[in-house]
Amino acid sequence: MDKVIVESLDSDFSGIVTAPNGKKVNIFFVYPGDELQVEYVKRRPRQRSLRIKETVRNHDWKLVKCDVFGECGGCTGQHISYKEQLELKFSPILNTFQKDLGISITPIPSEQIYEYRSRMDFSVFPGPIIGQRQRGNFRKVVPITNCSIQSSWANEALKNVQSVLNQKPEVIWDRRSEEGGLKYLTIRKAQNTEDGILIFTFTDGYESHPSMESFRKLCLESLSQESLLFCYNRPKSEVSAFGRPEVLRGKSTFTEIVLGQNFQIPFDSFFQPNPKGFLPILSFIKERLPKVCENLIDMFCGNGFFSLLYGDSFQNVDGYELTESSIETASKTFLEKYPNKSFSFQIANLFMSTELLKQKENATLILDPPRAGAGKLVNQWIRDFGPEYVFYVSCNPYSQKEDVSIFLSKYDFVDGILIDPYPHTPHTESVLFFRRKSS
């Protein structure tokens, strides 16, 4: 065995060590100055990796609030002061935008660093075990009884479901024997209303299994949460809260309030996992919307989140989203909220084609694409046909930077902010505001 010392921390909160062969290696859940006893392990021909045999921590872990921190694949930074977390993940982003694009972004820290997540997805494995995948080992699930970044309501629900599964462990899907059915538990709890929903994801076809009748009854008797929902998808699918729904009690949606607006969120749709932590971006956009602007273009609109928030500032809204259920929800909700405004929410795969996009005069564009970015076609469309004002919201500033570089020649950067809605993780959110250059 060899001894290595943690030299520094990377932007994802992993520690950097120099392996005995001279190569730099990243290791999670350590801190500069920690000493590690390691050995090389051969995994494949010509490939070796470091295995940690012993860790001597020369850094106090008193900041850590979670009992399974260091095993769970969720948080990676609880052992680091919040001030240092911000420096680690903000600085590389701010520097690369300034260096490569000449853009200066304002960083904003989070006001709440625990109990902030409104959605958590837990794997369910025979045992019975409810937990998170172990970092670096998809096949192992770390049991969790209390999660420090979700609400007390959600933690109570987690304990309740664990008690139910202790009584009916046979319903859990065994990935080896392919017996049972339950794969995931998803807990969604609104931050600004009392609404919450528990979602059990089963293998398709298990709804008719003889064990399900008694399991349904047990859930109804033992779980006090207002809304309980079962859904079913392919046995080999490792996707939670997705599939054919069965409402056991309550409803298949939950209500959240953001900036005074009510949102009905379907069980299987994306919604900001920390609405309160996202408020700086929402306020940023609201304060900078043009005083007079006729059209809003809402790309990757989801359930119509931005359209509903800012719809009162526009006469017409055009939204584009890939998911049919989200488009249906957006159309219905927008009509209820703004019955006298014109709108069009369309199903569109903007990564494959921008043919449905309409060039609009006197318009503002808001786009909030997935982590991978908006895609080449969308960015070229913005460059060639984009409206006067563009707000680009992103959960991955690095892909955002690559996108912006495509259309920046036609726009002036006005300002932007970088926020931290997910403390103890390397994830950030940003919004950049652009105005089209005069011809």
Image: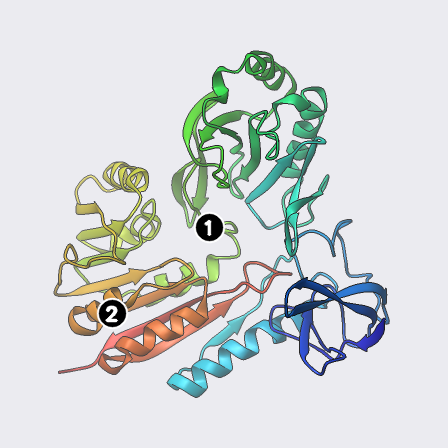
At which x and y percent is residue 353? Answer: 20, 58
Residue 80 circle label:
none
Quadrant where the C terminus is found in the figure: bottom left
- What SS does tag 2 mark? strand
Residue 82 lies in what quarter of the image?
Answer: bottom right
Q: Which residue is mark 1?
A: 272
- What SS does tag 1 mark? loop
Q: Which residue is mark 2?
A: 389
Residue 409 appears left or right of 53:
left
Q: Nearer the viewer, residue 327 or 11?
A: 11
State the residue at coordinates (45%, 41%): 256
State the residue at coordinates (81%, 62%): 61
Q: Is residue 308 visible?
A: yes
| Amino acid type of the residue that numbered disc 2 sits on in the rendered structure | Tyr
| Residue farthest toward the front in the current orientation of the protein | 45
**CA–CA distance between discs 2 and 1?**
24 Å
| Amino acid type of the residue that numbered disc 1 sits on in the rendered structure | Gln
